[in-house]
Image (spheres, helix red, strand yellow):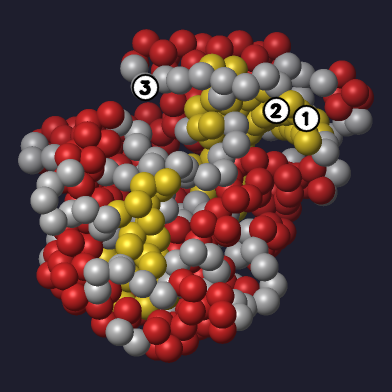
Amino acid sequence: MSQQLDRGRHVCVFTLHPVRDVRILDRQIMSLARHGYCVTLFGRGDEPPFDLPGVHVHPVFPSMRRLPRRLAAIVQLTWHALRTKADIYHFHDPDLLPSGVLVRWLRRRPVIYDAHELYRVKFKLKALGRPRLQRLITWAFGLVEDVLVRLIGNVSAVYEEYATHFARLGCRTVITPNYASRAIYRSDEPTDAEWAARQNKLVYVGAVNPLRGALVIIDAMRLVRKERPGAELIMTGRFYKERHERLVRERLSRPGYEGCVRIVPEVPGPALPALLRQAMIGVSPLQDVGQYRIAVPSKFFDYMAEGLAIIASDLPPSRKYVQEVGCGLLVPPADVEAWAAAILELLRDPARAREMGRRGRKAFLERFNWEACEGEFLGLYDSL
């Protein structure tokens, strides 16, 4: 680390996410390194520290599923932030906002807050069916976040709504959408032989739980296989909670569900394209609750990059990125039969699915990629 500190323009990044988080490490941090910054990353992981060109990665804690572990992780990251001298400090996650304010006051250096999600809406999910508690949570979190972010003064936000909100509070903001990077995807489209090998295959990447539609898509696949016995859904085993995994595996153990879904280990970002190339259709069955009504699924852009047709829940973000581009079909979120019908519609017409995939891929290459917004992100750093 000492060599990196000597180079100047040193950035320290702190997160409760895994240190190999694609958006943080592969996009933001590697962009900074290529731009001449020296970056040190502290975050979650159980591997020893390692180096990449211009980057030192320091895993601090292995897990934080329980509250005491999460609090301990916050304390650890705050301690590292106060003992590490940097030119700019970058904090992901609202849990670390107090740490960012403390560093801003004591170090007198610029601090950036990275807003990944629409947290004010997300936290409502913790009080479903209790509207008064939902309003209280939203008000309390919003008040605390606004005060602390104003003290920090600089924001990198995934969503335009958040960037606009913090700009009105007087913060310097940039929009850094969660687009996939062109760097890890092939420049040529699939050959005829490769496309033929993808037929009858679907893929679901990302976190797996009922609110993200895991059970809906599993039930739909059971119906699909009555007509197309060879159809298969490839699902990454990204379970944040053990009870979610139990629910999914219990559903798949029922009679009639055999072979509907193949669960594969979660893959790191650079290995994702190889997984996607096994499928013709990418699915995003988010349910119509909380932040999912307005959050943009990052999997859209990975699907587009590999030329997959998309079948997604009919929610506002899907209409913007799927319907307007013409790269897939939209389905009522909780309607199992409608999901099955949409899947069968494309499985019966692979040529149509391929044309949808081509439109999505074109949109990704021209607009919806990390490199298209990288300049604004680097511009924030250069201005600080």
**Of callouts 2 and 1, the N-terminal one:** 1
Q: Pointer 2 and pointer 1: residues touching (CB < 8 Å)?
A: yes
Q: Mark 2 points at which residue?
A: 57
Q: Quadrant of residue 273?
A: bottom right
Name the residue: 43% across, 88% down: 351
Nearest the camera: 116 or 98? 116
Q: Which amino acid does label 1 sit on?
A: Asp
Name the residue: 30% across, 84% down: 348
Q: Mark 3 points at which residue?
A: 65
Q: In which quarter of the image is residue 25?
A: top right
Q: Position of residue 285 (x, y in %)?
A: 28, 60
Nearest the camera: 360 or 323? 360
Within-10-Å neighbours for mark 2: few <14, some 14–19, many 20+: many
Name the residue: 36% across, 72% down: 200
Within-10-Å neighbours for mark 3: few <14, some 14–19, many 20+: few
Q: Is residue 346 left or right of residue 247?
A: right
Spatial CA distance of label 2 from label 1 is 6 Å
Q: In this view, does 122 lie to the left or right of 117?
A: left
Q: In which quarter of the image is the N terminus?
A: top right
**Of callouts 1 and 3, the N-terminal one:** 1
In the image, which disc is placed on residue 242? none
Q: Position of residue 15 (x, y in %)?
A: 55, 29
In the image, which disc is placed on residue 51? 1
Above or below, comparing residue 329 to residue 221 in the picture: below
Q: Pointer 3 and pointer 2: residues touching (CB < 8 Å)?
A: no
Within-10-Å neighbours for mark 1: few <14, some 14–19, many 20+: few
Q: In which quarter of the image is residue 361?
A: bottom right
